[in-house]
Amino acid sequence: MTKKTIILIGFIALKFFLQFFLLSSSYDLHRDEYLHLDQGKHLSWGYLSVPPFNSWTAYLIHLFGNSYFLIKFFPALYGALTIFIVWKAIETLNGNLFALILGATCILFSALLRLNMLYQPSSFDVLCWTALYFILIKYINTGNIKWLYAGAIVFAIGFLNKYNIVFLLIGLLPSLLATKHRVLFVKPGLYLAILLGLMLISPNLIWQYNNNFPVFHHLKQLEETQLIHVNRFDFIKNQVFFFLGSTIVIIASFYALLFYKPFHKYRPFIYSVLFTLLAFIYFKAKDYYAIGIYPIYIAFGSVYLADVLKDGWRKYLQPVAVALPVLLFIPMYNVAFPNKSPEYIIQHSDDYKKLGLLRWEDGKDHQLPQDFADMTGWKELASKVDHVYAGLQNKGNTLIICDNYGQAGAINFYSKQKLNAVSFNADYINWFDLSKKYENLIRVKEASDPNMELQETSAFFERSIIADSITNQYAREYGTTIFVFIAAKIDMRERIKREIQEIKNYR
């Protein structure tokens, strides 16, 4: 085993260690993770908000025990593979050992540590962006058509994971046209590769067509509820924070792609970052959508700096360059990760507020960062629903309906009684079991006037009570109420079918 291989293994091992070390036991899984895990129980070629890839790994997680370790293992694995691909890119660019260490350090101590904590499509999305850029480097170097086919396959897998990868093409295609590499567009191999990519993503496109393209409804909802609060200046500003310790390396890559002679053939990359960022800014995308851009530029910058710092007094700056990402990570350790209790965060709220970490999608500041609040209160909810369910007669004929996918997924994940909650929200609307007649209803309702729910629903049941509520003040679900309606006077299935149809008609 070579020295390089041993060092690479060391980086990957440290990556896995940090991904688990930076998570405090004070927190549950994240709201979105529950939805993605439940999608693994309902395999399909598409879902209302995401493509199918994440559901395939969720299926594997269920198959092998549904453990917390596995849920966190996959995003950590995607982060480790991102380090590996950047390492291989640096080798392809003829970088030396210092360049390899610098690049791996920059990737390790970055926003990817935060991103790779959650079981969401974003971690694999960054991996696919990095892999596709790496494949372009290989094609530019060799001209071998096999890299076009490899690129088509990686793009297709990335598309089946998250549609965000389309922005990579939006930035890359005009960049190729603006350079001598425009000759690629007259090569038949490119169009055969495009055909291969279309074939691979066609099952999802067909699913979208058969379901009236719910992706557009989802994008409209995002625009109306979340993207409307996105500030374009904040988007630009936050790009710096994602790879704060690597800023010099990334800037060096831009300079090198413009003026460093060995990198002249990679000129499309300098235009690509510009076009891609402009596209994100134009569509008012969330800042983290752009994280996948940067790892490959860290590879370019590391190779260039290794060349600049190899001789004379400059070689003494090499340890400084490697130490910088680590040193700048230390202050971020205290605020950017869920490794501090909610009580600690509230006591030190100024440290979080000045970095904008307390601002949620609604554009307002709250007690905790939104992601952290979305990781709180779920075990309490599931435990209380379990307790309510245990006290019912005819348990098997009880329907559990929640207001949102986080509530439904958390109950399904944490319930000791293996309950199956559903919702009219997200994909749960397609997962109602209407094969049996229900007698009881447990209704999990977001914080609101409880009397309103009682007035609306009690008329259809013999008895109704407010059973409990979420009392964890740090949870985004604080105040969520659990209602119980007993002995239905009507067949609830017909009412549910009508409501499902109305929602689908609206979409």
Image: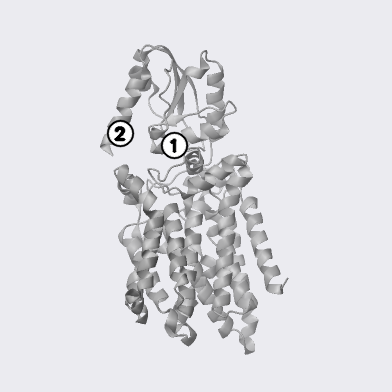
Which numbered disc flags the more N-terminal residue, 2 or 1?
1
Closest to the observer, 475 or 99: 99
Callouts 2 and 1 close, C-beta under 8 Å: no
Q: Residue furthest right?
A: 1
Residue 80 as seen in the image, left or right of residue 205 = right
Dot 1 lies on which element? helix
> Depth check: 249 or 85 in front?
85
Residue 405: mark in rendering? 1
Residue extending farthest left: 505
Corner quadrant of residue 16: bottom right
Choose top left, top right, bottom left or bottom right for residue 323: bottom right
Q: Which residue is mark 2?
A: 503
> Mark 2 to mark 1: distance in Å?
15 Å
Way the structure is coloured:
one colour
| Amino acid bearing label 1 | Tyr
Q: Position of residue 152 (x, y in %)?
A: 42, 64
* Res 27 visible: no
Front: mark 2 or 1: 2
| Along the line of sight, the residue nearer the viewer: 361 or 409 | 409
At x 56%, y 85%, the residue is 308
Which residue corresponds to the image point at 61% horizontal and 66% vertical from the top-left? 326
Residue, x 29% and y 43% (percent of image)?
212
Say which quadrant the N terminus sits in: bottom right
What is the x, y in percent for residue 34? Answer: 50, 40
Q: Amino acid at mark 2?
A: Ile
